[in-house]
């Protein structure tokens, strides 16, 4: 996937991500920058959930928002 496309997608998606995971800061969102692994780590850290729970939440988010996508590592 083209990095420029992911970056543009991320700019649109930041608001929805912040809405879903309200404890994420703007700095967190800058670090995440559309990368799924970074999002998972920050959700674990800020929301105090295990990796499998963070995965479940992100998968549910992706199902609800099929037009958005995360960069897989």
Image (cartoon, helix red, strand yellow):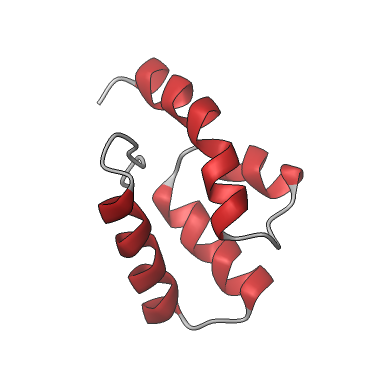
Q: Is residue 8 above or below residue 47?
A: above
Labels in figure, total: 0
- Identify the residue shown where x is 63% and y is 74%: 47
Residue 69: percent from left, percent from top: 32, 39
Residue 66 falls left or right of residue 17 = left
- Identify the residue shown where x is 51% and y is 53%: 38
Residue 57 falls left or right of residue 19 = left
Quadrant in the picture for residue 67: top left
Residue 1 seen in render: yes
Q: Is residue 30 above or below residue 20?
A: above
Residue 33 seen in render: no
- Identify the residue shown where x is 68% and y is 49%: 28
Residue 10: percent from left, percent from top: 48, 31
- Identify the residue shown where x is 31% and y is 46%: 72
Quadrant in the picture for residue 9: top left
Q: Is residue 49 above or below residue 1?
A: below
Residue 12: percent from left, percent from top: 50, 28
Residue 50 falls left or right of residue 46 = left
Where, quadrant-wise, is the N terminus in this rendering?
top left
Residue 18: percent from left, percent from top: 62, 50
Query: Which one is in front, 7 or 61?
Result: 61
Q: Residue furthest top?
A: 4
């Amino acid at each position: 996937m083209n990095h420029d496309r992911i970056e543009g997608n991320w700019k649109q998606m930041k608001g929805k991500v912040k809405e879903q995971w309200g404890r994420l800061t703007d700095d967190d969102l800058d670090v995440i920058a559309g990368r799924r692994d970074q999002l998972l780590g920050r959700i674990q850290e800020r929301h105090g959930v295990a990796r499998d729970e963070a995965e479940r939440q992100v998968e549910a988010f992706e199902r609800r928002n099929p037009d958005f996508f995360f960069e897989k590592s």
